[in-house]
Image (cartoon, grey):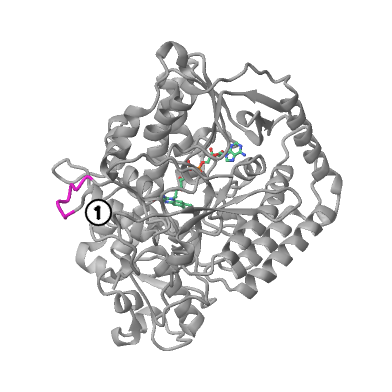
Amino acid sequence: MELRAKVPAGPIQDKWDRHKFDLKLVSPANKRKHHVVVVGSGLAGASAAATLAELGYKVSCFCFQDSPRRAHSIAAQGGINAAKNYQNDGDSIWRLFYDTVKGGDFRAREANVYRLAQISVDIIDQCTAQGVPFAREYGGLLANRSFGGTQVSRTFYARGQTGQQLLLGAYQALARQIALGQVTMYPRAEMLDVVVIEGKARGVVVRDLVTGAISGHVADAVVLATGGYSNVFFLSTNAKGCNVTATWRAHKHGALFANPCFTQIHPTCIPPSGHHQSKLTLMSESLRNDGRIWVPKQKDDKRPPAQIPEEGRDYFLERLYPSFGNLVPRDVASRRAKEVVDGGHGVGPLANGVYLDFRDAVGRLGRSGIVERYENLFEMYERITGEDAFSAPMRIYPAPHYTMGGLWVDYNLMTTVDGLYAIGEANFSDHGANRLGASALMQGLADGYFVLPYTIGDYLAQTKLETVGVNHTAFRDVEDQVTARVGKLLAVNGTRTVDEFHRELGTLMWDSCGMSRTADGLTDAIEQVRALRERFWREVRVVGSGEDFNQSLEKAGRVADFLEFAELMCEDALHREESCGCHFREEYQTPDGEARRDDTRFAYVAAWEYKAGQAPALHKERLEFEYVHLAQRSYK
Ligand SMILES: Cc1cc2nc3c(=O)[nH]c(=O)nc-3n(C[C@H](O)[C@H](O)[C@H](O)COP(=O)(O)OP(=O)(O)OC[C@H]3O[C@@H](n4cnc5c(N)ncnc54)[C@H](O)[C@@H]3O)c2cc1C
């Protein structure tokens, strides 16, 4: 299989404009004849479905929640980047492009990243026009704050609820099209497979989560906007329902999976409080604008933080990275936090955290200044920990949060299956080996509002599609397979709950394929994942039936897919004999503990092909860096 990224020729700043002109158009009369399936109604899916419908296409949109408004995107707290340079602090499209390529440790495709930076400015205009209540300066201009890995303020925000406000904007646009009959919305519907006919994606098979009915849906193109797979670690900051099922099943039909081992561990989450826990909570990175991170210099120091004098505190990020301080990128901040905790300096009842301290910021801005910026985050912290972060520092620790890996897509966001697109967190594009804060919302909305609506037209305008219906044998076959798999899960009738398996998998992945990895650990993890998968299919107990609302069954299907996917993640991490961004192989580090890349051997996207019953096949998309020169990342 040949990977063709289809990056247009010409200077990077002209590529996208030129490409848009070269793309074939579908006339308004013909758009009405095309039907597009969009799976997912988070920021990526809702923006794509609404925009495609606004253009005149007929759209069917699916999500597993009871309403599109409950997609995981609603949880996004801190903000969305755009190179508007409202602060006049030296920002530009070039700088956002540069920061993102460098932040991703040179493992992203330059042309995509440049396009993302270009489009970022349009997103803010679009969302403001929709009425998204971004924070404003006293003079009326939109306000900005800083996020990690940059030295400018380019993050637009709506308190700590940016995702919610952006999603309401996209949802309004979607709801308008639902009311007009252009979009048919299927909530509580889980896509369990894609249907590929003669090499082209022609629809999906879906299970109604309320009735259990399994049905096929025909389309001329299919868009997966199904989010990320951080829940492979069981404990993560993601919504409990986030999963890999849609992309994994597409992978089994020929869509290559890119860089699955690139998973982001976010430095500022509330540390676990015990083994009972089933979910972790993010404390937005925006807090690092004003909070200072430290640990006691003395090991096992049990004194309350207020009793530890200034000279007894190690502000380790400020000490190690004087230029960026507490705003180093996430991979760097997480690794350093792990290092100090592993070294015996952890704080809190389980000694598993570091402090994020607002004492100085309160002194500078007053309590009201902090409340204005972060009120809901302080409130959330107090509700979860019972501690008031105004009187004592917050305790934080890294946790799984975002996945840079995803389905491989070309410049048009098409996977290796014709007519099958992946957008938002579900694809691998743009963030390389480490995503900078506030860039996921930017990418999801860039894909949904501004890229896919152009590129999908090019495919539809040029592709001859035979008329098919749900009675086509391909649909029948896939429906039968989906029905059989549901039946198989119910038939195991073992003794262990789905959650027990998920928790065991998560612990294994966190220990072996989490913040740091070794060849020995990964080799062992592959064996253990295989054994766990085998036990799952022998011992899992799924209660209830397949004919009604059954969350145990839903979870079982997702965990079964995680158990297959986890093996590929470990294979990918094992084969990449370098450290880059979030992928930290202990064998490959500089003397001062930074990631040591190997550009000669690994400056490529690793795209894996599924081979039934065999080892996956690796395909490489070589990455060329023409505009941002390959260099050791430094934030000192
Ligand atoms: C706590 C938290 C805070 C964050 N804060 C920020 C931030 O401040 N700034 C930022 O840029 N990023 C942030 N992120 C990351 C960002 O929120 C996500 O990357 C982004 O929202 C993903 O959007 P999406 O549309 O790709 O996917 P999602 O919002 O996850 O939506 C996925 C959709 O797919 C549907 N779906 C999935 N599988 C199936 C299936 N099999 N069948 C049918 N439907 C399916 C779901 O129902 C859902 O509608 C944060 C992440 C977390 C966890």
Which is more toward the observer, 35 or 545? 35
* Circle 1 crowding by C-alpha within 10 Å: few under 14, some 14–19, many from 20: some
**Does the segment drawn in magenta span residue 351?**
no
Does residue 254 appear in this view? yes
Which is more toward the observer, 404 or 10? 10
Which is more toward the observer, 304 or 551? 551
Quadrant housing the C terminus: bottom left
Q: Please give the residue where the numbered disc 1 appears in the rendered image.
A: 95
Most frequent secondary structure within the magenta stretch:
loop
Judge whether 203 appears above or below 141 on screen. above
State the residue at coordinates (60%, 46%). 241
Q: Quadrant of residue 208?
A: top right
| Residue 126 x %, y % | 30, 33
Quadrant housing the N terminus: top right
State the residue at coordinates (37%, 56%). 436
Residue 84 left/right relative to 575:
left
State the residue at coordinates (53%, 69%). 577
| Residue 2 x %, y % | 55, 44
Q: Quadrant of residue 98?
A: bottom left
| Residue 622 x %, y % | 46, 54
Does residue 134 appear in this view? no
Q: What's the magenta region?
A: 84-90
| Residue 325 x %, y % | 29, 71
Which is more toward the observer, 464 or 479? 464
Judge whether 111 appears above or below 297 on screen. above
Instruction: Look at label 1 and name its amino acid.
Output: Arg
State the residue at coordinates (42%, 74%). 336
Q: Is mark 1 on a helix, strand or loop?
A: helix
Judge whether 118 appears above or below 469 on screen. below
**Does the segment drawn in magenta span residue 87?**
yes
